[in-house]
Image: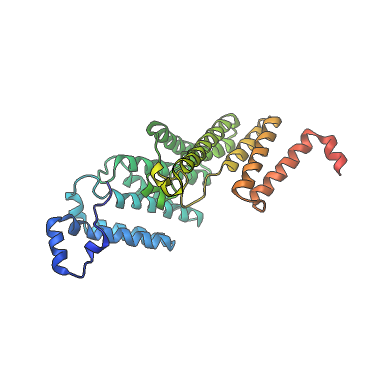
Amino acid sequence: MDCAVPPESALFSPDTSKMESVEAEDPRITLLRPFAVAESSFVHLTRQDKHTEAVAVLETVLRREQHTVRRMRPCLLTSLFERLAIGYNTLALHMLQDGHTDEALRVFAKAEAVTDPANHHITRGARLILRAVTYNNLGCFYKTLGKLHTALGYLRKALQIEAREQLSASAAVAAEAYAFNPSTTHTNMCALLSEMGDHQQAVVHAKTALMILKQQRKDRDSCTSKQGLQEVSECGPPPLPVKGPKPLICTAFFNLACEYEHLRKESEAMEAYLRAYEFALDELGLDHSLVHQIQSCLKHLSGRRFPAIETCSQ
């Protein structure tokens, strides 16, 4: 359940007696005000890419109000804890990109703690979504360090949650995070298995990512056409993340093509590259680096499949 905070006008009415009257009727307003203020600060700082400061704001209010937090009924602060888990993941990823691996691991550990089943302050659905996000990111973390089997374990945990729970991201979670999207986990699993030399299983995960992305695109298009642009939000949360790298169908086709090449299935690879090129033009535009990379792969593969044609063109 989201934090039960009234509209801003109720919290900051210039009529003090009126405000006190409202608070007397609903003591939750007074109880939740510091948490609402902290969440607002978190959002503001996150938009400025001040992720360390954003996380610190939430940690500070939880530490300062710990006695109040202990007395709260379950899930009353789910919105705050969602943001905290998101903040930890985002901060850890930035630390990893900057090469601060030890610090990143400590922050990931905090994200695991927030999404632990023992945390009754967050709803089960949000907790599982963010647990899967954390495991997926830890998989990427350990792959970066070259600890491939450890990475594999975390990605499998993420996939188990996603498969078991049939999850989709809530609007609140999707709006602030590198949002939950099962296709991303399958894409990461494809890349990891490819690096480990298991190209057959990498193909399976590339196809699964592709299937999920196609279905999301179909659902989104259907939702738009049936209800109109003004009513899209009623169809449920957007399947693609608001922040972070966007899962793309062209990338999924490209990964599939690469795996087919590893398996020496050149006809299948050629078809997948052509589909990747088609979607890349639509999703990215002609000048994008991935479009040029796909063109290069197509030329290279054509040269291998039809060497006589390649010779004549020289």
Image color mode: rainbow
What is the quadrant of residue 295 in the picture?
top right
- Considering depth in this image, is 314 or 240 the residue closer to the camera? 240
- Residue 196: image x %, image y %? 57, 35
- Residue 292: image x %, image y %? 69, 49
Q: Is residue 34 left or right of residue 154?
A: left
- Considering depth in this image, is 205 or 313 the residue closer to the camera? 313
- Considering depth in this image, is 7 or 229 the residue closer to the camera? 229
Number of marks: 0
- Residue 69: image x %, image y %? 21, 52
The residue sitting at 15% across, 65% down in the picture is 18
Q: Is residue 226 left or right of residue 116?
A: right
Q: Is residue 230 left or right of residue 191?
A: left
- Residue 20: image x %, image y %? 14, 64
The residue sitting at the bottom extreme is 14
Relative to 181, say whether 84 is above or below.
below
Q: Is residue 301 left or right of residue 89?
A: right
Q: Quadrant location of the C terminus? A: top right
The residue sitting at 22% across, 62% down in the picture is 10
Relative to 76, say whether 20 is above or below.
below
Q: Is residue 237 visible?
A: yes
What is the quadrant of residue 194 in the picture?
top right
Q: Is residue 106 visible?
A: no
